[in-house]
Image (cartoon, rainbow, N blue to C red):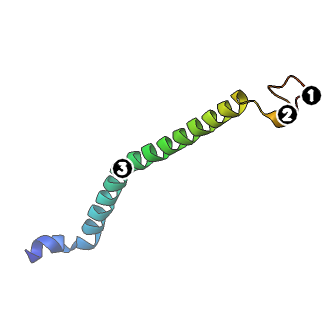
Amino acid sequence: MHAFFAMGGYAAYVWPAYGVFFAVLLIDWLAPQFRRRRLLRELRGRLARQEARKERTVTPSPLRGEGWGEGPRLP
């Protein structure tokens, strides 16, 4: 068993290579999940902003004279 873990004197090179390989494999497996979460969060934010913008344009504001037929429209 000791000979297996010693790798014929090359253990200092082999085991870190295995470690890097598995670390990259783990990152490669997790990255799409994190990207998906981030994209869904951004899309939810965009939809919420779009709905809020739609509400602001549909709801008449008495402060700007909307709905009363009087006064200038302010930007």
User: Where does label 3 land, which residue?
Assistant: 28
| Left or right, residue 44 beside residue 66 | left
Q: CA distance from mark 2 to mark 1?
A: 7 Å
Q: Give the residue displayed 17% in from the left and 70% down from the top.
A: 7
Crowd tier of the residue under label 3, counting other residues whose Cα lies within 10 Å: few below 14, some 14–19, many 20 or above: few
| Left or right, residue 33 beside residue 73 | left
User: Where does label 2 land, which residue?
Assistant: 64
Q: Given the current orientation, which residue lies at the most extreme top position?
A: 69
Residue 11 % position (x, y): 23, 72
Q: Give the residue displayed 43% in from the left and 43% down from the top.
A: 36
Label 1 near label 2: C-beta < 8 Å? yes
* Pair 1/3: label in front: 1
Q: Give the residue displayed 25% in from the left and 68% down from the top.
A: 15
Classify the position of the C terminus by image quarter.
top right
Amino acid under disc 2: Arg
| Left or right, residue 56 beside residue 66 | left
Mark seen at residue 29: none
Residue 46 % position (x, y): 59, 38
Q: Which one is nearer the viewer's eye here, 4 or 51?
A: 51
Classify the position of the N terminus by image quarter.
bottom left
Amino acid under disc 1: Gly
Q: Which one is nearer the viewer's eye here, 24 or 74?
A: 74
User: Where does label 1 land, which residue?
Assistant: 71
Crowd tier of the residue under label 2, counting other residues whose Cα lies within 10 Å: few below 14, some 14–19, many 20 or above: some
**Mark 1 secondary-structure assignment:** loop
**Mark 2 secondary-structure assignment:** helix
Q: Which one is nearer the viewer's eye here, 69 or 23?
A: 69
Badge 2 or badge 1: first in the primary sequence: 2
Label 3 near label 2: C-beta < 8 Å? no
Q: CA distance from mark 2 to mark 3?
A: 54 Å
